[in-house]
Amino acid sequence: MQNEQIYFKNRDVAAFRLLDVLPIESMKLEDWTVFATSYGGVPIAKIIANKLESNFDLILSSKIMAPNNEDCEIAIVTESEEVVIHEELAKAFEISLDFIFAKSKQIYDKELMKTVKLYRKDKRIENLTNKNVLLVDEGLNTGLTMMACIKTAINLGAKSVSVATPILPSASVPTIESIADDLYYVKKLDHFVFIDFYYDKLENINFEDIKNIK
């Protein structure tokens, strides 16, 4: 049976649909840095950055999964050591904050920093003082990664932080709007399945695909 809820043929189409809702001409009056917040968000962020004639980068992060459940994401740690926790899940599974922060530190030190060193050639993510930041992804599931990236940009001194994504759950909208300056999207859904469900073709993108894209 054909999925009648396919909204985007691929990432390129999603990017151009997103450009339709972004105030590109007014944004061009200021300088922006466009960040992808996942590997999958990179092609979309690159198209938007090119249209804005702005710098492009990627905020690297890792997921913290629940113990004994590798499919359940309970927290995100970013390359600036920002940790955002899915508090409802943590409480539901009775996972202590001590465990989450210890696990985050372990993953940051043993896994994430290796990726950061490869991608940034032993440099750290740039200071964003007085810069306008646009965070872009291919879609949001829980919104946890985007929240972590927003907080990362804020803590790196960004002048403003805006978010752009083709599709997201309606439940994520007020959460993101509460800390981002602007939120741009093509479609929000009350009953959200998962990102891949709404794309006709969403090829897997890994670090090898993006490591030299800057």
Image (cartoon, helix red, strand yellow):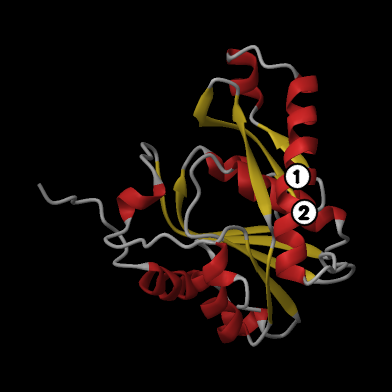
Q: Quadrant of residue 123?
A: bottom right
Which disc is residue 178 wearing? none
* Left/right of residue 167 with respect to residue 128 in the rendered view: left
The amino acid sitting under disc 2 is: Met
Front in this rendered view, residue 70 or 57: 70
Count of all numbered marks drawn on residues in the image: 2
Which percent across, then down, holds residue 85?
69, 32
Q: Can the viewer see residue 133?
A: no
**In the image, what residue occupies the spot 77% across and 49% down?**
151
Q: Is residue 18 above or below residue 93?
A: below
Task: Classify 10 as above or below 192.
Answer: below
Give the image quarter of residue 46: bottom right
Q: Quadrant of the C terminus?
A: bottom right
Give the amino acid type for the residue marked by disc 1 in the picture: Lys
- Residue 96 point in image, percent of width and height: 73, 16
CB-based contact (under 8 Å), mark 1 and mark 2: yes
Mark number displayed over residue 113 = 2
Label 1 to label 2: alpha-carbon separation: 7 Å
Q: Residue at x 58, y 14 (%)?
A: 92
- Specify few, some or many for label 2: CA neighbours under 10 Å numbering under 14, 14-19, or 20 or more: many
Query: Which of the pair 53/116 is nearer the observer?
Result: 116
> SS at mark 2?
helix
Residue 105 visible somewhere in the drawing:
yes
The reply, left or right, for residue 79 in relation to residue 45 is right
- Judged from the image, the secondary structure of the residue bearing numbered disc 1 is helix
Residue 100: image location, x then y, percent: 73, 27
| Residue in the picture at 46% in, 49% down | 168
In x, y percent, where is residue 91?
64, 15
Residue pictured at 48% horizontal, 70% vertical: 21
Pointer 1 residue: 110
